[in-house]
Image (spheres, helix red, strand yellow):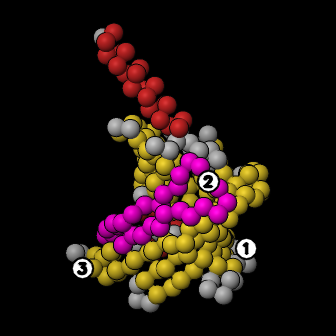
Amino acid sequence: MKTYALVLSAFLVAVAAQAQDCSIFYPFRQGVTMEYTSYNKKGKVESSTTSTITTVEASGSAAIASVSSSIRDDKGKEQFAGAYEVRCENGIITMDASSLISPAMQQSFASMEVSIDGDGLVLPSKLEPGQMLPDASTTIKAGSGGVNIINMTVNITNRKVLGREEITTPAGIFNCYKISQDTDVKMMIAKTMTSIDYYAEGVGVVRSETYDKKGNLEGYMELTKFEK
């Protein structure tokens, strides 16, 4: 019994150490809840997403956070519920491929059978102005009754650290790294957009803005609640 307790204790210490090393741009801590609200270009609420870290476990040299997610419409009614993983190894955070799908897209797939495959979004623990970050891509297939209805590809390129900026949201004031990226969505038609994401240490994304090819704001998302 004593040996088991020592092994369990060592395991928990290892998980805690890995989680601590990985909490630079994501809160690797069980029980943390983040609420994001999405707005259109005029500031009207379109949807909200609540994500809760359910577990943080060690897997070899990596720490893996399992996250449950719930998306609600502008009236607060749940439209979609799911889960995804965030992995950290050697100080590099990787969001799984499903994280590349916007809340609006996830809502449209709510009643379908969905398969997602691709490269996750990678974020190193050290960022500097001018730094280029790895591309990411994912392929989504959705259908019903074994019949494929939707084939969609999302490619994220030209990811660049622009600098640092202080951002204020309903969740607080954050000193952020500002990162730009281009997103190409190919389905029936192709659409290209640019987004600006703001990452705060120990939190992750606190604001994300989306612009069309002409540089006009299409919508934005903010962290509206953060509970440890």
- Kind of element beneath mark 3: strand
Residue that numbered label 3 is attached to? 147
Q: Is residue 64 shown left or right of residue 40? A: left
CA separation, marks 1 and 3?
38 Å
Toward the top, the furthest residue is: 2
CA separation, marks 2 and 3?
44 Å
Amino acid of disc 3: Val
Residue that numbered label 1 is attached to? 43
Towards the viewer: 201 or 99: 201
* Location of residue 225 in the rendering, given as x and y in whole percent from the top left corner: 66, 51
CA separation, marks 2 and 1?
30 Å
Residue that numbered label 2 is attached to? 127
- Mark earlier in primary sequence (2, 3): 2
Up-down relation of residue 165 to residue 138 (above or below)? above
Look at the magenta stretch and give its main secondary structure: strand
Label 1 CA crowd tier, 10 Å (few <14, some 14–19, many 20+):
few
Residue at screen point 42% across, 55% down: 84
Label 3 CA crowd tier, 10 Å (few <14, some 14–19, many 20+):
few
Within the image, what quadrant is residue 110 found in?
Answer: bottom left
Up-down relation of residue 169 to residue 41 (above or below)? above
* Location of residue 2 in the rendering, given as x and y in whole percent from the top left corner: 33, 9
- Kind of element beneath mark 2: loop
Amino acid of disc 2: Leu
| Residue 24 falls within the magenta-colored stretch | no
Give the magenta range. 111-140
Image depth: mark 2 or mark 3 in front: 2
